[in-house]
């Protein structure tokens, strides 16, 4: 069977278009079913309410994007897909109820929305099942040959293995280093030296070659890559594919100047994005302040009843440019939790966390007093979490590019917080840094909106840490 050599982004576009068409059909069917119970004709209802179909379909796709339903590899994980579809359905209903509450009477009908969600859910699941069937039939499978069996090549292969990416098949490696020419690396064969790359690629029906060597590209290797490209085989650098598959930056494999701006803007954030950030910061502070006024005293009383001591906790953190500031939180641990052993990372089952504190952490409510830090300009609503200075010196020495985090203002929530668990070791902090750097490189209003929606879902589902 002939394989369609689609890039990661092309696969996402196809999935997105399919989801949008399914949602449009669901909207049409929902309106048709609703019309059967009304005296008005279908054409009248379609004229009056048909405008909501593309609007609802767009919202449905945006929620699917917010719930990571376009993440590579997720499409073949049935349980995870179903859970996220449920989140999209509940999110759609929640948004509709919010709009319905403020809309004039009889402007937004209720029953068609339930029909739409049901049809879109069922149609979406069927469409995804057809997509998975196409992947498993090898129609969209991308056969990859990796140049270099060092850290970069192994990291990419491990990412494919960890995510069980059925639509990406690693054929093997090529490498000139005799010490790496073992029968297998991570279960994949080393097929020969780099000079034979084109012949090996043709022999194994490879449709993508990934260059994953960290040192400077030599002239002879450059010529080999050009020959492969001339033969119609795309060449991808390892960091680009790794980022697309994992939504993380492989800090051990990127050049020292990877974050330097290349455009005429010189790395300056656009005025429109700065206005957007200012807007969501202050909008959050407004709603957060209302919540604190109404429920803050109750939370403070519960904290004090559960564990003697103050309700609030102040901790020194590092902000943009290394500036120290005082971060305010609801106390979730016992008083003087670090007296015996000094500063240490909190773990998921940390015995120092109180009973009320564990609930506050699950719902992220312990972070709510940080609206004070947002108003003071210490942090944004969205950005890398601010690190404690006690840990910074060690992390800067052990983790490449860790100091880059200080180039932007930290945030109350961020990409690493919604994508990864609580970091309680240097290795886990490295993974979170990879997510933080991905955010710094790709931040935009849409990515911020995605982080915000996923944070709300974590709060409602008690899945915070």
Image (tube, rainbow, N blue to C red):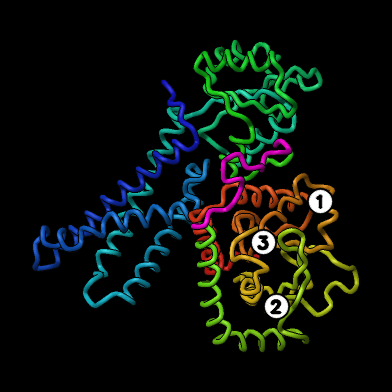
Which residue is the site of mark 2? 355
Q: Position of residue 90 (x, y in %)?
A: 41, 64
Question: Residue 176 colored magenta?
Answer: no
| Residue at 60% across, 39% down | 262
Question: On the rendered structure, is 347 left or right of 63?
Answer: right
Against 17, is 290 above or below? Answer: below
Between residue 100 and residue 390, name the one nearer to us. 390
Q: Position of residue 365 (x, y in %)?
A: 61, 74
Q: Secondary structure at mark 3?
A: loop
Q: Which residue appears farthest toward the front when viewing the image?
A: 264
Quadrant position of residue 278? bottom right
Element at label 1: helix
Q: Quadrant of the N terminus?
A: top left
In the image, taking residue 425 as reference, residue 222 lies left or right, namely: left
Judged from this view, the residue extending furthest toward the right is 340
Measure the alpha-carbon separation of dots 3 and 1: 17 Å
Q: Main secondary structure of the magenta part?
A: loop
Q: Which quadrant of the figure contains the C terminus?
A: bottom right
Q: Which residue is mark 3?
A: 410
Task: Decide: few, some or many residues near mark 2? Use Cα within 10 Å; few <14, some 14-19, many ≥20.
Answer: some
- Residue at 25% across, 64% down: 112
Q: Is residue 125 visible?
A: yes
Q: Mark 3 or mark 1, which has the lower sequence index?
A: 1
Q: Which residue is mark 1?
A: 396
**Magenta part of the protein: which range?**
253-272
Compared with residue 375, is residue 270 higher up or lower down, i.e. above or below?
above
Give how far apart the Cα atoms at labels 3 and 2 are. Answer: 28 Å
In the rendered image, residue 380, in percent from the top left (x then y), is placed at 61, 65
In-image side of 351 versus 137 (left or right): right
Could you tell me if residue 359 is visible in this image? no
Discs 1/2, front: 1
Q: Earlier in the sequence, mark 1 or mark 2?
A: 2
């Amino acid at each position: 069977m002939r394989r369609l050599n689609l890039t990661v982004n092309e696969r996402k576009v196809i999935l997105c278009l399919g989801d949008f068409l399914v949602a449009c059909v669901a909207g049409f069917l929902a309106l048709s079913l609703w019309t059967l119970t009304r005296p008005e004709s279908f054409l009248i209802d379609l004229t009056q309410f048909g405008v909501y179909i593309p609007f609802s379909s767009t919202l449905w796709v945006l929620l699917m994007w917010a719930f990571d339903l376009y993440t590579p590899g997720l499409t073949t994980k049935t349980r995870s897909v179903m859970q996220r579809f449920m989140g999209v359905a509940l999110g759609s209903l929640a948004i509709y109820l919010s709009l319905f509450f403020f809309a004039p009477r009889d402007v937004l009908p209720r029953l068609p929305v339930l029909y739409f969600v049901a049809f879109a859910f069922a149609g979406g699941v069927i469409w995804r099942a057809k997509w998975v069937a196409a992947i498993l039939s090898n129609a969209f499978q991308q056969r990859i040959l990796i140049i270099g069996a060092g850290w970069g090549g192994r990291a990419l292969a491990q990412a494919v293995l960890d995510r069980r990416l059925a639509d990406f098949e690693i054929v093997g490696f090529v490498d000139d280093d005799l010490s790496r020419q073992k029968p297998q690396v991570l279960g994949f064969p080393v097929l020969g030296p780099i000079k034979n790359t084109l012949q090996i690629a043709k022999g194994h029906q490879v449709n993508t070659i990934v260059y994953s060597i960290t040192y400077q590209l030599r002239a002879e290797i450059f010529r080999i890559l050009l020959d492969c490209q001339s033969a119609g085989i795309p060449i991808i650098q390892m960091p680009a594919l790794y980022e697309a598959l994992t939504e993380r930056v492989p800090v051990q494999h990127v050049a020292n100047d990877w974050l330097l701006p290349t455009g005429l803007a010189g790395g300056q954030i656009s005025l429109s994005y700065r206005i957007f950030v200012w807007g969501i910061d202050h909008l959050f502070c407004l709603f957060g302040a209302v919540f604190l006024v109404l429920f803050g005293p109750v939370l403070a009383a519960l904290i004090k009843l559960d564990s003697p001591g103050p309700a609030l906790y102040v901790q020194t953190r590092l902000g943009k440019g290394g500036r120290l500031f005082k971060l305010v939180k609801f106390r979730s641990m016992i008083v003087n939790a670090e007296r015996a052993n000094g500063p240490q990372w909190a773990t998921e089952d940390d015995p120092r966390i109180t009973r009320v504190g564990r609930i506050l952490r699950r719902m992220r409510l312990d972070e709510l007093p940080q609206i004070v830090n947002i108003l003071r300009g210490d942090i944004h609503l969205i950005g890398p979490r601010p690190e404690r200075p006690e840990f910074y010196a060690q992390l800067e020495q052990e983790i490449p590019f860790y100091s880059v985090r200080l180039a932007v203002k930290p945030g109350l929530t961020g990409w690493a917080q919604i994508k990864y668990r609580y970091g309680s070791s240097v290795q886990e902090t490295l993974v979170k840094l990879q997510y933080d750097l991905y955010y710094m490189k790709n931040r935009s209003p849409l990515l911020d909106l995605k982080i915000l929606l996923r944070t709300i879902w974590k709060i409602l589902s008690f899945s915070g840490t």
